Amino acid sequence: MSEDILAGLAGIVNEVAGVPAEDVQLDKSFVDDLDVDSLSMVEVVMACEDKWGVKIPDSEVKNLKTVGDAVKFISAHV
Amino acid sequence: MTVSIKVPTPNAFTRILSVGAYSPSRIVDNDEVCLKIDSNNEWIVERSGIQERRYAAEDESVLDMAVKAAKIAVERAGIDPSEIGVLLLASCTYPYLTPSAAVQVAAQIGAVGIPATDISSACAGFCYGVGMASDIIRSGNAKYALVIGAEKLTDWFLDDDRSIAFLFGDGAGAVIIGPSDTPGIGPTVWGSDGTQTAALGIAPSFIEQRKDPANNVPMLYMQGQTVFRWAITEMARVAKEAVDAAGITVDQLDAFIPHQANNRITDALVRSLKIPEHVHVSRDIVTSGNTSAASIPIAMSRVVSEGSAPSGGLALIIGFGAGLAYAAQVVTLP
């Protein structure tokens, strides 16, 4: 399940921010490692909501610092 | 005995007859902004598209800029200021609660006596004004309307506020709207969401500051991610509704002139609306920054003066911002 979510998220990050999908690993920070800025992060979150039918409120977005944080959140809420 | 009262003779259609803009002469590039904030040119361009903005002089006011833009619009419309039947001025940075800026602009352009009032809808204010002015003229209550957006944002943020300081600029734009033989202003799609006042605004109030001087003076605040998310989802829907309400399709537009909030928002709207390549998309933010209620008429003036879209061509305009509030129309360009 988590692997599927990681693969899906990697595709989204690639599509939104042009980051190579293979760079999107659990321990990577969106901002520091992948250079996904705050506005791109909003688009990533929105694409995740569409793909998995989860609701990620703005107040939660700041807690999603790493790819692993996002995968964990989505896994727990799908 | 039943008597009926007289009502004005309505006009079937309206259009924008002219547009004028004024931008202050002082150009402030990203390097200058970065003298006060920990940032750099590349970071600012990537996040906003802005390369430079205009700052008003210390002694140059919202009124001064509004008057300059208004005079250009009036002259281009070829009307006498006394013929203006209503003046609506949109601003969120005019620093007096009363009297309104509008009555003083009326006096300064030689139109003492006309109905004049301000609109408090921040970045949506200009399109609110276009909608109201068009409807006032259609009702027959006025022949010509002067709608102005004028802002001096630089009075309302600290130049070392990293989240805000790079975004905003100063300026004014104005249009004259009048009756038309053919439809020139489509239905206004407008609304508000007063549950989201925390997303964007100016606070605290002067009263709070007066009661406790330890409070900050009123300054702009913004939750960038919240506003961005709202803008790229809800405003895409509103823009589409405005196009549908006008009975046209997106590929029939000649220009898309959104509020110049952030190029990233414009990019997302262009993608969502599937705006084709032949439609000119205003990117005036690159050199003007975000000028709130003034951004659409300033951008429109540029489209017209540079010939980026033809006179009489169709433009989709959409204003959105603090409130949250929004308004959009399809208009024919002057």
Image (spheres, rainbow, N blue to C red):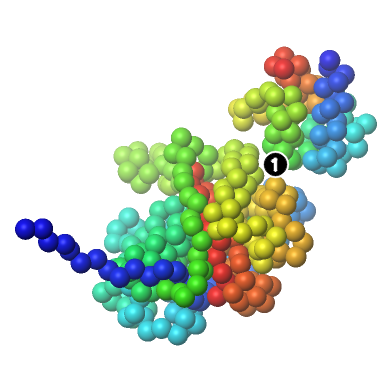
> With respect to residue B125, does B214 lie above or below?
above
Identity of the amino acid at label 1? Leu
Q: Where is residue B130 in the image (x, y as percent from the top left)?
A: 46, 63
**Res A63 → quadrant:** top right
Figure quadrant of the C terminus of chain B:
bottom right
- The N terminus of chain B appears in which quarter of the rendering? bottom left
Is residue B276 something one can see in this rendering? yes
Disc 1: host chain: A
| Image position, residue B242 (x, y; %) | 56, 54
Judged left or right of residue B269, residue B109 is left
Question: Residue at 57% across / 58% down in the picture?
Answer: B247
**Residue at horizontal 38 percent and vertical 70 percent from the top:** B11
Identity of the residue furthest to the front in this view? B1
Q: What element carries label 1?
A: helix
Of all residues, the one furthest to the right in this rendering is A22
Please report the residue visible at 61 percent of the width from the left and 67 percent of the height from the top.
B314
Vertical side of B272 occupied by B151: above or below: below
Residue B110: name its quadrant. bottom left
Q: Nearer the viewer, residue B105 or A7?
A: A7
Where is residue B82? Give x, y as percent. 32, 80
Q: Is residue B188 left or right of residue A78?
A: left
Disc 1 crowd, CA 10 A, few/some/many (<14, 14-19, 20+): some
Which residue appears at 59% of the width and 55% of the height? Answer: B243
- Identify the residue under disc 1: A39
B35 displayed left or right of B312: right
Work out whether residue B102 can be spotted.
no
